Amino acid sequence: MEERQLILFVKNKELGKVKTRLAKTIGDEKALFIYKALLQHTRKVAEKVEALRKVYYSTFIDSNDEFEGDSFEKRIQVQEDLGIKMYSAFKDSFGERADKVILIGSDCYEINEDIIEDAFIALEDNDYVIGPAHDGGYYLIGMRALNKSIFENMVWSTEDVMLDTILDIKEQKKSYFLLPTLTDVDHEKDLGELKNFL
């Protein structure tokens, strides 16, 4: 299934460096605990997807973590802004003969394997697939051919990211498919079922 590749972007589990907006109200230790729960969920979901799976870490490869074994390749994100990080990961995959590539983060507790499978199916008839987040960003983006422009000149972590991405796709006269809108866990109000972990 190497023609189908699933990229996971994760942050290394370091106290005070993950879920910093969430930490402002629940503290660094609880924010780290929540992030670990998100990572566990993301791993379980990804393992059920038939694809070549890759984990891209923010700063260093963690050789002894949730993503052990043969289920995931491990790599490091390039040290640039988020757009270049994502573009570089897509470029790696398309350079390795993938023809459908999907990237997800590790902040969405509502994501499941069916949504990711639907994303791969959508790429059979569309150039792009996007999973909108309630905050105006996206929890998933996928494409079937490499394109740098949708990652350029973007102000990340704002409420206009998804809209600006769609406008760029339309400007190119390309097709896209929107998945269900889900919640990224960035603030205490986003926790939902994760409150039970605290």
Image (spheres, rainbow, N blue to C red):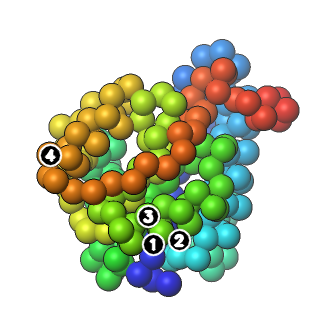
The answer to whether marks 4 and 1 mark residues whose Cβ atoms lie closer than 8 Å is no
Other-residue count near label 1 (Cα within 10 Å), few / some / many at <14 / 14–19 / ≥20: many
- Looking at marks 2 and 4 on the same chain, the residue that comes earlier in the sequence is marked by 2
- The tag on residue 5 is 1
- What's the residue type where badge 4 is placed? Glu
Please tell me which residue is depicted at 57% across the width and 29% down the height of the picture: 186
Q: CA distance from mark 1 to mark 2?
A: 6 Å
> Disc 4 and disc 1: Cα gap in Å?
26 Å
Residue 66 or 107: which is nearer the viewer?
Answer: 107
User: Few, some or many C-alpha atoms within 10 Å of disc 2 (few <14, some 14-19, many ≥20)?
Assistant: many
Q: Nearer the viewer, residue 192 or 174?
A: 174
Q: For mark 2, what is the residue? A: 53
Determine crowd level at label 4: few under 14, some 14-19, many 20+ residues with C-alpha closer than 10 A: few
Check disc 1 and give the amino acid type. Answer: Gln
Q: CA distance from mark 2 to mark 3?
A: 19 Å
Q: Position of residue 111 (x, y in %)?
A: 62, 50
Asked if the residue under mark 1 is in contact with the one under mark 3, i.e. CB atoms within 8 Å, the reply is no
The residue lying at 23 percent from left, 49 percent from top is 169
Where is mark 3, residue-wise? 122
Choose top left, top right, bottom left or bottom right for residue 146: bottom left
Position of 152 with respect to 131 (left or right) is left
Q: Amino acid at mark 2?
A: Arg
For badge 3, the amino acid type reads Ala
Which residue is found at the position 27% from the left and 31% from the top?
155
Q: Which mark is residue 171?
A: 4
Quarter of the figure with the C terminus: top right
Tell which tag, 3 or 1, sits nearer the viewer.
3
Residue 49, x across and y down, in percent: 61, 70
Q: Earlier in the sequence, mark 3 or mark 4?
A: 3
Q: Quadrant of residue 33?
A: top right
Mark-to-mark CA distance, 3 and 4: 20 Å
- Label 4 vs 1, first from the N-terminus: 1
